[in-house]
C-alpha cells in the first residue's frame, strides 16, 4: 500500500473513487434517479436466463446487487429468492435454490420456505396470498 504524504493510504482513495464511479454509473443508468429501480439484468448480468423457472409476469423484479441471487416479489410482503440450478455455481453451494421470505422480516425466522422445489415455492406463495386476502377481508 502506497502512503502519500499527509494523506490516507492510496487504497482508501481508490476505494472512495471506485464507490463514486459505481454510484455515478447507477445514477447514469437511471437506477438511483427518482423512481429508478435495479433489475436482474443490471444486478446480475451474468445470471443465465435458463436458470430461472417460469415466473408470472405479475411478479415484480426486486433484484438488488448486494444480494447473493435475484429476487422477485409475487405480492406485497413476500419475496422469492432464486439461485442458480447448479449448486456449485451458487453463492453458497450448500444452500438451497429457492427461498420464500417475508419482506419485512429479514431474519431467518421470516423464511416460509427454503428448498429446491419450485412447486413448493408456488404453493407457499399461493398460501400466503390466500392468508393475506383473508386478513384484508377481516379488517
Image: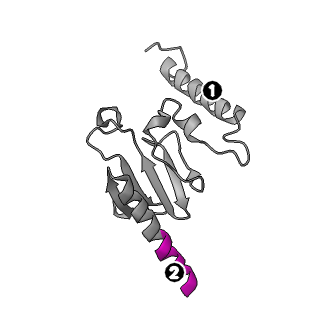
For marks 1 and 2, give the CA distance: 45 Å
Quadrant of image for the N terminus? top left
| Mark 1 neighbour class, 10 Å CA radius: few under 14, some 14 to 19, many 20 or more | few
Q: Residues within 10 Å of mark 2 (few under 14, many from 20)?
A: few
Residue at image position (47%, 76%) is 131
Q: Under tag 2, what secondary structure?
A: helix
Between disc 1 and disc 2, the foreground one is: 2
Q: Is residue 103 above or below residue 128?
A: above
Q: Residue at x 55, y 22 (%)?
A: 13
Q: Which residues are magenta?
A: 129-139
Circle 1 residue:
21
Task: State the residue at coordinates (51%, 23%).
Answer: 8
Any part of residue 10 in sight: yes
Q: Is residue 9 visible?
A: no
Q: Please, is residue 133 above or below residue 38 in the view?
A: below
Q: Is residue 93 left or right of residue 60?
A: left
Secondary structure of residue under mark 1: helix
Using the rendered view, name the quadrant where residue 138 is placed: bottom right
Residue 96, image x, y percentages: 31, 47
Residue 105, relative to residue 34: is it above or below?
below
Left or right placement of residue 139 versus residue 70 in this view: right
Amino acid at each position: 500500500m502506497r502512503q502519500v504524504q499527509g494523506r490516507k493510504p492510496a487504497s482508501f482513495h481508490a476505494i472512495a473513487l471506485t464507490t463514486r464511479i459505481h454510484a455515478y454509473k447507477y445514477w447514469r443508468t437511471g437506477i438511483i434517479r427518482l423512481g429508478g429501480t435495479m433489475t436482474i439484468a443490471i444486478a446480475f448480468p451474468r445470471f443465465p436466463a435458463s436458470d430461472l423457472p417460469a415466473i408470472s409476469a405479475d411478479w415484480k423484479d426486486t433484484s438488488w446487487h448486494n444480494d447473493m441471487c435475484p429476487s422477485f416479489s409475487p405480492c406485497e410482503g413476500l419475496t422469492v429468492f432464486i439461485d442458480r440450478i447448479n449448486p456449485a455455481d451458487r453463492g453458497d453451494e450448500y444452500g438451497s435454490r429457492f427461498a420464500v421470505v417475508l419482506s419485512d422480516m429479514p431474519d431467518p425466522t421470516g423464511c416460509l420456505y427454503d428448498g429446491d422445489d419450485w412447486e413448493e415455492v408456488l404453493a407457499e406463495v399461493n398460501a400466503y396470498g390466500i392468508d393475506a386476502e383473508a386478513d384484508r377481508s377481516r379488517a
